[in-house]
Amino acid sequence: MTQPTRIYLDNAATSWPKRESVVNAAIEFIKSCGATAGRGAYGSAQQADRWLSDARRQVAKLIGAADARSIAFTSSGTHSLNAALHGVLEPGDHVVATEIEHNSVLRPLHQLQLNHQISVDFARCDLRGVADWSHAAELIRPNTKLIAIGHASNVTGAIQPLEPWSQLAKKAGKLLLVDASQTIGYVPVHVVELGIDLLAAAGHKGLGALAGTGFLYVSQDLQTDFKSLMTGGTGIQSESIDASITWPQSVEVGNYNLPGIVSMAVAARELCDALSLQPIPWQTHWREMYQRLLVGLASIPGIQIVGSNPTEQTTSTVDHVALISLRVQNWNAHDLAAVLDSTFGIEVRAGYHCAALVHRAIGTVAEGGTLRISPGNSTTAQEIDTLLDALRSIASAEM
Ligand SMILES: Cc1ncc(COP(=O)(O)O)c(C=O)c1O
């Protein structure tokens, strides 16, 4: 039997395929330099330093940060979020997060709470996966240090409007942490205009950099006292075993993943260049694929898009990143994902998607989560149509 062609629709986990320019830049770095940054004084080490500084500049420009030194590189969105939380939280602090958060926010917070270091409250979200900032406002206490909001739900795709969260944090005098792991590269975000104190992101999803990449933006006023998640070699004050590790080494302790960082620099630079064009090419493509998928799904009997038809009364419409969670009548999400893969070569993900709390709100706990389909900037219209045909035949089959 011939293997069906692979159709990758799990870009919310990590984007694939990567752009050639991004892959080539990483290969070029490995072949032509390959030295470590921040340590040696020889030629190729200095070249590595320059790659690193350039990467900070490109990523800072992408998110509107005034100073390139506000960017620290990490290995993932999870690493960035853990570093952010451990960097600013102190015993006795209270945090307001939301039900839409990924486990890389929920679990570190839960762990800190179990260790009796902090307390946490979660603002509820509605059936669309939109978090309620007025509920968050009610949860704020005098000892609240931080408000954490995910820019988009990785289960329903709902993009959270950041202005109200920014206003809430500013008015209450609290720090604002934004998890942009699902939006960076797809949706513009400007840390200065939005008054964001900390922005954590993966580099390997919408931005399109290699796996094993992420970054953390920390505003200047928080950098001096920013605490380290880990300690070890930094290339600075190496004669001392108790040298205080300063920003950004407080996050970047150990050797750098320079091929990954270079790939992120190129991805960020290309995106910044594209932002000056109208219409912005990358932002139109994934939106077109998302719309095509949405319209196609609506025409298939027995398919329900999770979070699209709330019974709650809402007056506002909500924007989405390119991911859709759905149910197919008489099908369990895991079986459906297995059939799509084995019979049609279509790779999508089933389950809770590492977001423990949102399923209570959107009603998908008992059924084992959702089937999540996430096109990206490399997805073609033909791939979407093949998926729709496959779902049509599955949904219409006699059970
Ligand atoms: C909203 C959100 N935050 C954080 C993460 C963690 O990112 P990473 O997979 O790079 O650790 C993810 C990954 O799926 C995510 O969707």
Image: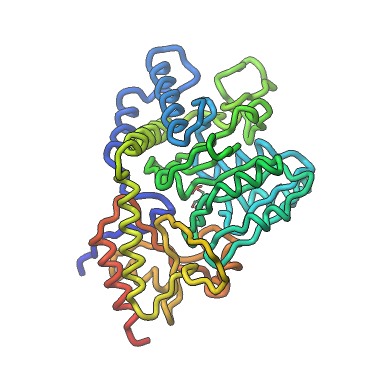
The residue lying toward the viewer, choosing from 311 and 75, is 311
| Side of 33 relative to 228 (left or right) | left
Residue at 32% across, 73% down: 391
Where residue 148 appears, x then y in whole percent? 62, 47
Please identify the quadrant where the N terminus is shown: bottom left
The residue lying toward the viewer, choosing from 297 and 111, is 297
| Side of 332 relative to 266 (left or right) | right
Location of residue 90 by image quarter: top right
Residue at 49% across, 54% down: 159
The residue lying toward the viewer, choosing from 20 and 131, is 131
Where residue 206 appears, x then y in whole percent? 40, 47
Let me know if residue 334 appears in the view.
Answer: no
Where residue 27 appears, x then y in whole percent? 31, 32
Let me know if residue 393 appears in the view.
Answer: yes
Residue at 36% across, 33% down: 269
Location of residue 297 by image quarter: bottom left
Up-down relation of residue 340 to residue 237 (above or below):
below
Query: How is the rendered protein coloured?
Result: rainbow
Residue at 23% across, 64% down: 3
Please identify the quadrant where the C terminus is shown: bottom left
Kindly give the residue lying farthest to the bottom in the view shown: 398
Up-down relation of residue 218 to residue 107 (above or below):
above
Where residue 357 appears, x then y in whole percent? 61, 62
| Side of 238 relative to 342 (left or right) | right
| Side of 381 relative to 197 (left or right) | left
The image shows a total of numbered marks equal to 0
